Image (cartoon, rainbow, N blue to C red):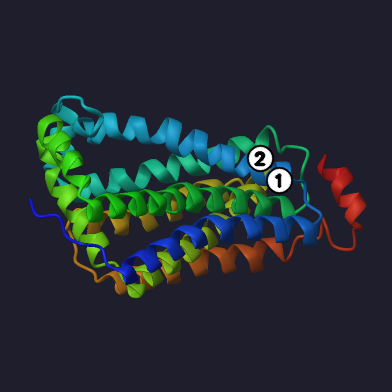
Amino acid sequence: MEIPYVGTAQFVWLILGAVLFITVPVLVAIIWKIRKKEPVTTILIGAATFLLFALILEKPIQNVLAFPTAMGLKDHAVSRFLNARPILLSLVAGLFPGVFEETGRLVAFETVLKKRRNRETSISYGIGHGGFEVVLILGITFFQYLVYAVMMNTGVFGTVIEQVAAQAPDQLGSVEAVMKQLAGFSGADLAIQVAERIFAVLFHIGASILVFFACKDKKRLWLYPLAIVLHTAMDFVAALCLFNVITLSPWMLEAFAAIFGSLTFFGAYFFLYRKDESSCGAKPSEKLTAAE
C-alpha cells in the first residue's frame, strides 16, 4: 500500500482545526460563565453526562448490538439482521444517541441539577454537553491526525499498516481512506467540520432547553420525548448517508444540519427560554444562590 505525502498546506489546516476545536469550546464556556455568573459545575456536569451516557453507556451497547466486529466480537443474528437492512440500521444508529443523550439530560436535571431552576442552567448544561463533544470527538481526533501525518511523512506509518494487516485486515480500507483524507485535506474540509460542529452545538443547547423545561414543568414533560425524536431524526439522516442509503454532498448534509440545528435551538430559545422569567430581574448573586 502506497503511503501518500502530506503537504505543508494540509498541516496548516490540521493544526488550525486542532486548535479551534479545543480552544473555542473552552472560551465559549468561560465567556458564558463570566457573563451570566453561572456555576462552572453546571457546565462540567453537562460534559460528564455526555461522557457517561453517550460514550460509556450508549456506544458499547450499540456496538454490541449492531457492530460487534468493531469491538472484536463475532457477528450474531441481530447484527446480521440489522446490517442486511441499512434503513433499519440507520434508524438504530439515530435512535441510540437520541434515547441515551436525552435521557442523560433528563437524569442530570432531575438529580444533580434539580435545585438549579434558573433558565441559564439549560444553556450552561448544553454548552458543557456540546462543547465537550467537540473537544473529544474533533479536537483530540485532529491531534491524532497530526501524529498520523508526521508518521506518514517520516515513513513510520508503514509499521501501523503492517499491524493492521496482521490483526484486523478488514480495517485496511479505513486506514487507506484516512491516509487519502489527510493527504488531500483542505480549507473547505475544515470549513465543513466547523459548520457541522456549530450547528451540532446549537442543537445540543436547544435540546437541553427542551429537556430542562420538561423537568421544570411536569405539564411540559412531552418536551422530553420530543427531544428524543428530534435527536433521532437528525442522526438518522446522517446515518442514511453513512450507510449509502441516500447520497448527499457534504455541503447538502451540512445544510440539513444547519436547518435542523437552527430550528431546534431558536424554537426552544424563543418559545421556552425567552418566555421564562425565572431569572429576569434577578441579581447575579441571587441567581448563584438559587443555583447552589
- Residue 7 in percent (x, y) is at 27, 67
| Residue linked to disc 1 | 216
What is the x, y in percent for residue 85? 14, 45
Q: Is residue 160 visible from the viewing direction of this image?
A: yes
Q: Amino acid at mark 2?
A: Phe
State the residue at coordinates (57%, 58%). Answer: 23
Judge the density around disc 2: few (<14), some (14-19), many (≥20) Cα neighbours within 10 Å: many
Answer above or below: position of 67 versus 211. Answer: above
* Left or right of 226, for residue 146: left
Q: Residue furthest left?
A: 1
Q: Position of residue 202 (x, y in %)?
A: 54, 62
**Label 1 or label 2, whichever comes before in sequence order:** 2
Of residue 76 and residue 142, the one placed in the foreground of this image is 142
Neighbours of disc 1 within 10 Å: few (<14), some (14-19), many (20+): some
SS for dot 2: helix
- Identify the residue position indicated by label 2 in the image: 109
Left or right for 219, reference 97: right
Query: Mark 1 touching mark 2, by CB under 8 A?
Result: yes
Q: Residue at x 72, y 59 (%)?
A: 32
Residue 9 in the image, given as x and y percentages of width and height: 33, 71
Q: Can I make out residue 220 in this image?
A: no
x 60%, y 35%: residue: 107
Q: Quadrant of the C terminus?
A: top right
Seen in the picture, residue 148 relative to 7 is either above or below; the reply is above
| Label 1: which secondary element | helix
Q: Quadrant of residue 258?
A: bottom left
Q: What amino acid is found at the position of numbered circle 1 in the picture?
A: Lys
Real-space CA distance between mark 1 and mark 2, rounded to the nearest whole angstrom: 8 Å
